[in-house]
Image (spheres, rainbow, N blue to C red):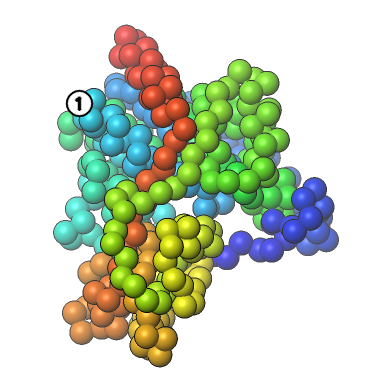
Amino acid sequence: MREPRFWYPAKRGSVPLAARLLSPLGSLYGLAGRLRLARTKPERAAIPVICIGNVTVGGAGKTPLALTIAERLVARGEKVHFLTRGYGGREAGPIRVDPAHHGAEDVGDEPLLLAAVAPVWVAANRPEGAAAAIRGGAGIIVMDDGLQNPSLTKDFSILVVDAASGLGNGRLMPAGPLREKADNALTRTNALILTGRGHAGDGVAARARARGIPVFNSIVRPASLPAFDEGPHLAFAGIGKPEKFFRTLRELGVELADTVSFPDHHVFREKDALGLLVKARELGAQLITTEKDAARLTHAPAASARARLAAAARVLPVRALVGDIDALMAQIMDAVVRARRR
């Protein structure tokens, strides 16, 4: 879905009329979430569980951060397995993701990205997914999302906030972008990471520091710096905040002839693919997209426009570059050691 403009008003601190009108529904949404947290008794896995989540809908940068942390853990010799809901996929799980056979329509797009680093389990029921991961040889579970899911005990939880957009208008869905109030989430948070550049997240960062929660800064950077072709590029993205991808390309010196945005987790149709291919030809431009969008184009029928788009588009893989990553990893490993002593 596309984020309504009133979720992120141009004038910070203002609350548009639509948000005020929808606030009663937001209050009901918040009440349902609090009741779920209060009534659910979390299950504890036999291995440490690290959770990377947020309080807003989409676009905060959880997945690049999950990849970065998992790579660091793997480099330490840890047997990392990811656990995720698999948003947008039909599989309820628990199921281990196999990129050779599963497409985004099966398990969602993000699990296909995560699978490049470590085994991934998709499970609507997180405790069952954790148990399946343990049977599969996991030594540590990294949850990509799940901060609002109380069914599984977390040993270390990271709250990710976009530094440029912060908490938007501060209202709960559907009046605003919040899944829950930030202060409630902070009670279950061990570290807060501000992603990108900006000051909209300064308020929640100050509240985190007041609670003794460490705050880190992070930017998204290419996993490896590709050699871009000279000449114009046509960039397309169906992620939470496509403009962040386009900004990254410009910062890398890529000449953008045009950009095309789609809603987050967009399922590409033949007309979408054809439109992009035709536009690129008209502009004389090289197509370029995100890893997530490329994942949604996998397993397209060989003769389809989607398959041609997948073959034509260059892909920019990214990771989170965290300031003082060693300090963050030290805190995570302390939590891992404590969990293993239980």
Please say whether residue 31 is visible from this viewpoint: yes
Q: Residue at x 18, y 60 (%)?
A: 101
Q: How many C-alpha atoms fall within 10 Å of the one at disc 1: few (<14), some, or many (≥20)?
A: few
Q: Residue at x 23, y 25 (%)?
A: 76
Q: Secondary structure at mark 1?
A: loop
Above or below, 125 relative to 298? above
Q: Residue at x 64, y 20 (%)?
A: 211
Residues 133 and 333: in front is 333
Please say whether residue 38 is visible from this viewpoint: no
Horizontal and vertical percent position of residue 134: 23, 30
Three-letter amino acid code at disc 1? Gly
For this view, does 3 lie left or right of residue 121? right
For this view, does 20 lie left or right of residue 104? right
Q: Residue at x 20, y 26 (%)?
A: 77
The quarter of the image holding the N terminus is bottom right
Horizontal and vertical percent position of residue 62: 45, 44
Residue that mark 1 sits on: 77
Of all residues, the one furthest to the top in this rendering is 341
Task: Report which quarter residue 235 is drawn in.
Answer: bottom left
